[in-house]
Image: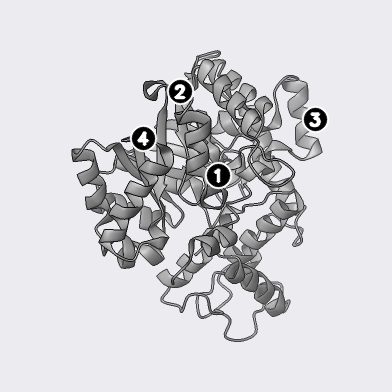
Amino acid sequence: MSLSRRDFVKMAGIAAAEVAFGNFDRANAATKTLSEGEKMSAYQVGFGMMRLPSQSDGSINFHESCAMVDEYLSSGGKYFDTSYVYQGGHNEETVRKVLVERHKRDEFELATKLPTFFMDSKEKIQVTFEEQLRNLGVDYLDRYLLHSIYSTTYDSKILAYDMFEFGQEMKRQGKIREFGFSFHDTPEVLDRVLSEHPETDFVQLVVNYYDWESPFIQSRRSYEVARRHGVKIFVMEPVKGGLLAKLPALIHNRLQELNPTMSDASYGFRFAAGLDGVEIILSGMSSMAQVKDNISLAKNFVPLSDEEKTLLFNSVKLFKESGPLKRSDFSIYENICENKMPVAEILDAYNSIMVQLANGCMVQAENGYYRGLQFLAGRETGKTWIEGRIVDKEGSDITELVRAAEDYLIKNTFL
């Protein structure tokens, strides 16, 4: 599929910005054993630059963004993350203006990403990389990522154009310090990529308690794959695009009783921070208050208690039950199609997307996965999987419901 830079940004929405209790022990077992009050360096809070504050005309608020960058650096933060496609394709230039041109190069660490989905030749990779260095006003990058590895593009683009080899060559030339990739596909695909490329320094994953057991994103299983391969883990979407910054009232009120000064968003950070192997937790900060809150959390890290974990996982159930399908258990939709259409997964993801939209979340990670599921199943991507009536385990005809959900996922897919 050929995409223009503008089309990708539009589809991804980047420019603007079940956990069952039976699985609780697995989530708990994956976390670090940390003593109460153990400190975490502010370095581990990465400043994601994709959601910088904007003005009424849509342009970046330069003065507020500069103040946020200065506050982050003066508080001990160092790591900034951008991309070729953020902010309508202009975020790298913005980073140059608010960071690079105002601070010494050794005061910060900088990461950007190769837009793998735009590449159509090996030569274009080199040209794009050099353009990115110019955009940012630097002669080297601390970290460089392949942006969004998908099953649909792994063989056809990433391997075909030797993108991993390119990364290693840039490391040899001193233009990249570390090389990795961001990922939006199944744990099985992640295992393949890391098995074929053990030279990978780090992987950037969607990790949060909402998606810990979600059927599309599968945070837990992807995290476990990365741990088995021994790569550094960078976390993105710790508060799921903002959804987890405002928890259901029942959960919020109880957490306030436990920790009156703790924001709802802070629990997403603390969940990710408690996982072994996590080096950086990215936060797409859009206000000075968020910068200060995240830095404070890092400097005064306290592990989640068992009660807090239980409340957080219960919030996922409440969030899902607030969606259009009014349920958190989608098992009545499992294995109901002879053609292996993953109906339960589709409806779970669709329900979660609608919850996010209802709460003002502009980017929904689930939209990056359906095409990959079709591709891996040998289906024609972007076409319907439905081949007849679909009846759930309670005897209800849900064909039109599934059609609506699938149609949404196809029309709103990132790639």
Q: Residues within 10 Å of mark 1 (few under 14, many from 20)?
A: few
Q: Are marks 1 and 3 in contact (CB under 8 Å)?
A: no
**Does residue 301 appear to the left or right of 188 in the view shown?**
right
List the residue tagged with mark 4: 138
Residue 177 appears in the rendering: yes
Mark 2: secondary structure: loop
Q: Is residue 234 above or below residue 149?
A: above
Percent x, y of residue 5: 49, 60
Mark 4: secondary structure: loop
Q: How far apart in space, not on screen, are marks 4 and 3 (Cα)? A: 47 Å
Q: Are marks 1 and 4 in contact (CB under 8 Å)?
A: no
Amino acid type at circle 4 is Val
Q: Residues within 10 Å of mark 4 (few under 14, many from 20)?
A: some
Tell me which residue sits at (54%, 64%) in the image: 7
> Quadrant of the image for the N terminus?
bottom left
Amino acid type at circle 1 is Asn
